[in-house]
Image (spheres, rainbow, N blue to C red):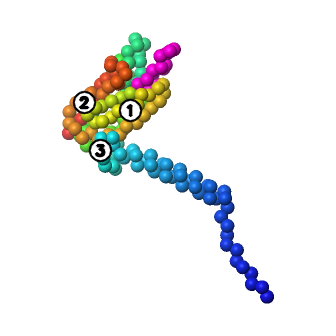
Amino acid sequence: MQKKKKKSPKISRGAIISFSVVTCVIILIGAVALNSFNPVNSDNFVFAPSSNVFLKAVSNSNGNYHYQYAKGGKTSSSTEGISPSISASKGNLIQLHLINEDRNQPNNPSKHNINIDEFDVHTKDLGYFQSESVTFVADKLGTFDYYCSIHSDMKGTITISE
């Protein structure tokens, strides 16, 4: 009598590829999530909910550039023509989202950015309909300027209080 050898189950090539893809996606999502807890002005991770501030870079019919504050997909009408003041409490984690909604003119691509020097917040120059988010800790008291380094009339203030 011959003994029958047990065959070990083989893992298919498709299963290995599927497992690899799922693992890569999970690692990527984890890296993005972890990066959102790493403020630009701190060496440590901050595991706290952030205050989201949405600013849209636009120009009005007069050609003046400004930021608009947006919350829940709606733009605050009180900020038309001026850049809004932002307020936050000291120690808060703030996630600033800049969206460039300024349409390009012929031979004049519209680029915008935002900078807050005291908190080491600097975005890249964003083209039409590009966006960037920056997270920082409001660790200083006072009123600070934010501005676009391309358009001198695009500026506003952020006030950090107790």
Q: Residues within 10 Å of mark 2 (few under 14, many from 20)?
A: some
Looking at marks 2 and 1 on the same chain, the residue that comes earlier in the sequence is marked by 1
**What residue is pinned by disc 3?**
42
Over which residues does the magenta segment extend? 100-112
Q: Which mark is nearer the camera, 3 or 2?
A: 3
Look at label 2 and name its amino acid.
Phe
Between discs 1 and 3, the one toward the N terminus: 3
Q: Distance from label 1 to label 3 (Cα)?
A: 16 Å
Disc 3 residue type (three-letter): Ser
Badge 1 density bin: few <14, some 14–19, many ≥20, Cα 10 Å: some
Q: Residue at x 30, y 28 (%)?
A: 146
Q: Is residue 68 above or below residue 22?
A: above
Which dot, 2 or 1, sits closer to the camera?
1
Task: Decide: few, some or many residues near mark 3? Use Cα within 10 Å; few <14, some 14-19, many ≥20.
Answer: some
Q: Name the residue that disc number 1 marks.
A: 123
Question: Do the numbered discs 1 and 3 sit on residues whose CB atoms are within 8 Å?
Answer: no
Q: Secondary structure at mark 1?
A: loop
Q: Label 2, on which residue?
A: 144
Asked whether the viewer can see residue 81, the reply is yes
Name the residue located 48 percent from the left edge and 27 percent from the top edge: 129
In this rendered view, identify the residue nearer to me: 71 or 16. Answer: 16
Rendered location of residue 127, percent (x, y): 47, 26
Question: Label 3 vs label 2: CA separation?
Answer: 18 Å
